Amino acid sequence: MFRAAVSDVTPLPAPAHPPHGDTLPVPRRRTRRQAPIVEAESPGAAALGDVVVAADDTPGVATPGAADPLSFRRPGVRDQTLRQLRRGRYPVEDELDLHGLNQAAARDELAEFIASSRHAGLRCVRVVHGKGYRSGARGPVLKIAVNTWLKRHADVLAFTSARAIDGGTGAVYVLLR
């Protein structure tokens, strides 16, 4: 019966080119809502410093790979708080996407973003650093750098890799003071 119903159907012609070309999509820069501009230099910018983070930044400590989750909490931050942050229980109030930036530009954007978020009274933000799949043998350059910079920043209480729906190991939830 089915064959009789579709007996006069002709197949569609094959497309001239594959539907997904060889070019990679251009990353889009997400816009964030405007926070008040801080006139004075924030202590966060000084905390990040002018350090370019290399893959061998800390001797004896393995650097995270593309699929490795990030997690950090300051002394005094409870395990339960970090667990709730990891599970996405804190509402994300703002987001910064660092895709396509070099280390110097990413460091400056991150310092400005944390300072303006802190000044605006935000508690939880998301930073998208990417998984570093296009970094080749260098590994996830921005992921390693963001991990180091956030640990050094005084306004960061804790951070952990995001849930899969929010970017997974290519993004972190950051809990601010």
Image (spheres, rainbow, N blue to C red):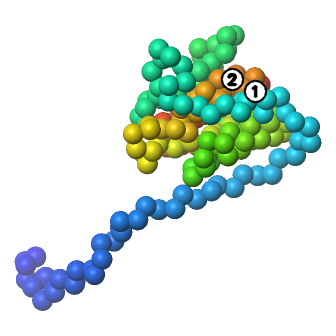
Task: Name the residue beneath numbered marker 1.
Answer: 47
How crowded is the residue under tag 1: few (<14 C-alpha within 10 Å), some, or many (20+)? some
121 vs 64, nearest the viewer = 64
For residue 138, side relative to residue 22 (left or right) = right
**Badge 1 vs badge 2, beta-carbon distance below 8 Å:** yes
Relative height, residue 139 to residue 58 (above, below) = below
Res 107 → quadrant: top right
Q: Percent from the top left, x then y, of residue 86?
A: 55, 28
Q: Percent from the top left, x then y, of residue 144?
A: 54, 32
Which residue is found at the position 35% from the left and 65% from the top? 22
Which residue is found at the position 13% from the left and 82% from the top? 6
Tell me, for residue 161, which label it has, or none. none
Which residue is found at the position 43% from the left and 48% from the top? 134
Q: Please give the count of numbered marks on the rendered protein.
A: 2
Q: Percent from the top left, x then y, of residue 118?
A: 80, 34
For residue 140, side relative to residue 102 (left or right) = left
Tell me, for residue 152, which label it has, or none. 2
* Helix, strand or loop under label 1: helix
Q: Which amino acid is tagged 2?
A: Arg
* Helix, strand or loop under label 2: helix
Which residue is found at the position 85% from the left and 33% from the top? 42
Q: Residue furthest right?
A: 39
How crowded is the residue under tag 2: few (<14 C-alpha within 10 Å), some, or many (20+)? some
143 vs 155, nearest the viewer = 143
The answer to whether one can see residue 67 in this image is yes
| Quadrant the C terminus occupies | top right
| Mark pair 1, 2: CA separation | 6 Å
Q: Percent from the top left, x then y, of residue 51?
A: 67, 31
The answer to whether one can see residue 168 in this image is no
Q: Could you tell which of marks 1 and 2 lies nearer the N-terminus?
A: 1
Q: Which amino acid is tagged 1?
A: Ala
Q: Residue furthest bottom?
A: 8
